[in-house]
Image (tube, rainbow, N blue to C red):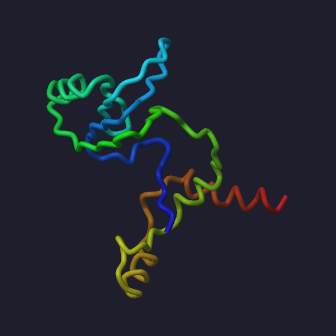
Amino acid sequence: MRKLTPFDRSAQTAPVLLTAHAIHTADVAASTATAMLTDRGRILAIGTLADCEAAAERGGLSPERIDLGDGVVVPGFVDAHAHPLMFGQMMSWVDCGPEKAGSIPEIVALLKEPNSSLSELQLCLPAAFLLCQQR
């Protein structure tokens, strides 16, 4: 099942210290780094491994380490391609994936649960999509 990642909050739940052959910083000097520290979708530090380890220590973080070897990273690249009405529709879907339900009765129970966590806007977007399709 396709997982929904909201655009307004990061799916990252723990800090990560990423190392790679080249991490493009996109600064004025077009410099490259070899390490980057992130937490909850935010870049906290970028530079050498020592720079990022020091930043993690100052922040009291114990990041997961991921080495991409000869990989190249372009942080901050955002795909601006969006379907806002589809996003609203997906927000109203019930996740019946294997992490949530392991049997048919568990799927039925999930589908019977009222989804009180949806905002009025999220509930209205699928209806707005259907109205647009009828015109």
Which residue is drawn at the image coordinates 44% and 74% (left, top)? Answer: 96
- How many numbered circles does the render carry? 0
Kindly give the residue lying farthest to the right in the view shown. 135
Kindly give the residue lying farthest to the top in the view shown. 29
Which residue is drawn at the image coordinates 31% and 36% (left, top)? Answer: 19
Q: Residue 2: image x %, image y %?
A: 51, 64
The answer to whether residue 87 is above or below residue 92 is: above
Which residue is drawn at the image coordinates 58% and 40% (left, top)? Answer: 79
Name which quarter of the figure residue 126 lies in: bottom right
Classify residue 71 as left or right of residue 79.
left
The answer to whether residue 11 is above or below residue 94 is: above
Q: Residue 121: image x %, image y %?
A: 57, 50
Q: Residue 61: image x %, image y %?
A: 17, 35
Classify residue 81 as left or right of residue 43.
right
Quadrant where the image shows the C terminus: bottom right
Q: Residue 54: image x %, image y %?
A: 18, 24
Name which quarter of the figure residue 36 lies in: top left
Which residue is drawn at the image coordinates 40% and 30% (left, top)? Answer: 22
The answer to whether residue 46 is above or below residue 82 is: above
Name which quarter of the figure residue 66 lies in: top left
Classify residue 94 as left or right of residue 131.
left
Kindly give the residue lying farthest to the front in the view shown. 70
Closest to the observer, 105 or 123:
105
Closest to the observer, 59 or 101:
59
Closest to the observer, 64 or 49:
49
